[in-house]
Image (cartoon, rainbow, N blue to C red):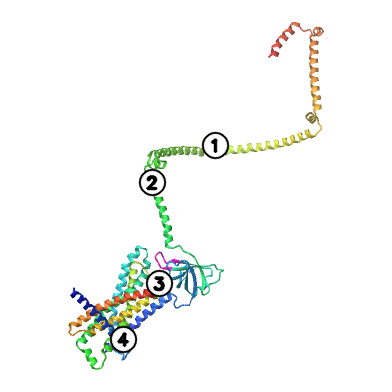
Amino acid sequence: MNMMLSKITGSLNTFFIEVGNILLFTVNVVKQLFSGPFEHKELIKQGYQIGNKTLPLIAITGFIMGLVLSLQSRPVLVDFGAQSLLPGMIAVSIIREIGPVITALLCAGKISSGIGAELGAMKVTEQLDAMEVSGTKPLNFVVASRVLATTLLVPILVFFADAVGLLGSFVAVNMHESMSVRLFMSQAFNSLSFSDVIPATIKSVFFGFFIGLIGAYKGYHTDKGTESVGISANSAVVTASLVIFIIDLIAVQVSDIIYGF
Amino acid sequence: MKKNKNQPLKLGIFVTLGLFIFIVGIYYLGSKQDLFSSTFTVNSYFRDVKGLVQGNNVRYSGINVGTVSKIDIVSDSTILVKMSINDKVREFIRKDSKVEIGSDGLMGSKIVKIHPGSANAGSISDDDELESTNSLDIEEILKEAKVVIDDGQIITKNLVEMTDNLNNGDGDIAKLLNDDEITTKLSQFGDEMISVSQSIDGITRKINRGEGDLGKLVNDTTITHEFHSAMDQFGNIMLRTDTIANELMIFSKSMNNGNGLVNRLVYDSTMADNVDTTIYKVGKSVDNIVDAAETIEKSWIFNLFSGNNKKERQEERNSRKPNNMK
């Protein structure tokens, strides 16, 4: 009994220590973002890796999600004779939830793990220590640039995912009935409002920030040994995915309060 | 190195395209909600807004012309709905236009409908108020539908009873449906009707051929001509009768108004009495003459000169008497 209690206490301690470390790490990274020097070359390099290299994955996934969601939803709407509501329903689903969350999860899998592994390897091979010795701030050069890149580019990836998802939905709708692009877009945007777009965009920024931050944190705090690199990468994906859902939950509640859905 | 040089360009294109998609989406969404066009405000008061929320569409004659910008509770029974409407349609919305809250389809979101007003009422101004009307909502429709369903159940029950009676009962309609006797009689009646129609057909054929009196009457024109000439003659007779009647009228007039014998005979009672007395006297004189004649006949002088046999006269007298008696 005492052992179990001590285990729970130990787990809680570890959790709170982790939370505290992440908070401190976040504060340090934010400080680095606003203090110089601004590593714009590194930012472009990371932006290219995060944005351009992830786009095909995001585009394919977004297209399939729009297509599948439409095909799955259509029979239910047909039962009610409400298939004309399909574009609006899909648009709201993609813009508000599926676009940001699917993009964020994919980025967590690809980018966060990548950052975690890369920084973990740098930590294990003591490159980060070498940077500090040579006067380069690793938090600024390595971490801040990556966090800023994910923060800026994940929302843009979300825009692409939304657009491609709507394209997939349009294809799905046209598999069963003929509908012009103009009519599809009109029906889709008739159901949308700024209260759908703005919270989703803000949410995407937070997703991007935490994807980069958690990847960097896990990599930056990798233990000694090469196997720790894999653990860091894996932990980054899991933690980032969990944080994405938590942020999503908070975002829904905040949207409810602000817009009164 | 070349790869690194292209990275900023590719990243730039990527970011630009992403932002372009976002801006186009925002602009399209904004234009849908008249965010980039000039608007004016219209107010309307409702007792119940039925779930209307800010941002719901406002429609004028089925066209989206604006959105609900604000909903406020004014009192316990009054709710103010402010609508932001595109300035382009201001001239079409009249001051006496009516506003109601409806649904976009059966399951769609709530909308505000503005119904056109009269042409002589002026165009609406900014911050004007439009009168609201109550629309039939789903709950009311369901209540009415329940009444219809209840009635339908009663009708169905009655129909079931009726069909049951039709199938198993002994009423006239049931017999008509289930009994073969009526149809047999109807069939017989039909056969009889066919034979009657055949007979009628034969008669009409004979008439058409001019057979018999009726055929002649129908087909022969001589009878018609004769009838015409008879009618002509009858006409002449009628003319003559008319003339005679006129003459009789003149005669009767003369008789009534003149001083002739007939008039006096008809109207003068004294003369009638005189005539009557005279006739009586004449009759009496004739009787006297007859008596005198018989006396003369019976006188011996007359018999002497006449030479008649007494016996013959007696026979003659006897032969007359039975005839007179008859």
Chain holding disc 1: B
Region of the chain picked out in magenta, as a range = B101-110
Which residue appears farthest toward the bottom when viewing the image?
A: A134
* Residue A59 seen: no
Sequence-earlier tag: 4 or 3: 4
How far, Cα to Cα, is label 1 from label 2? 58 Å
- Lower position in the chain sequence, tag 1 or tag 2: 2
Task: Residue at 31%, 70% (x, y): give it.
Answer: A69
Q: Nearer the viewer, residue B9 or A239?
A: A239
**Tag 1, which secondary structure?**
helix
**Contact (Cβ within 8 Å) of mark 1 with mark 2:** no
* Dot label at residue A143: none
| Residue at image location 49% in from the left, 70% down from the top | B44
| Both labels 4 and 1 in a single chain | no
Q: Is residue B14 above or below residue B115?
A: below
Q: Which numbered circle lies on residue A30?
A: 4
Mark identifier at residue B163: 2
Residue type at numbered disc 4: Val
Mark 3 belongs to chain: A
Q: What amino acid is at disc 3?
A: Asn
A75 drawn magenta: no
Label ID, residue B216: 1
| Residue drawn at (35%, 76%) of the image | A200
Report the chain holding disc 4: A
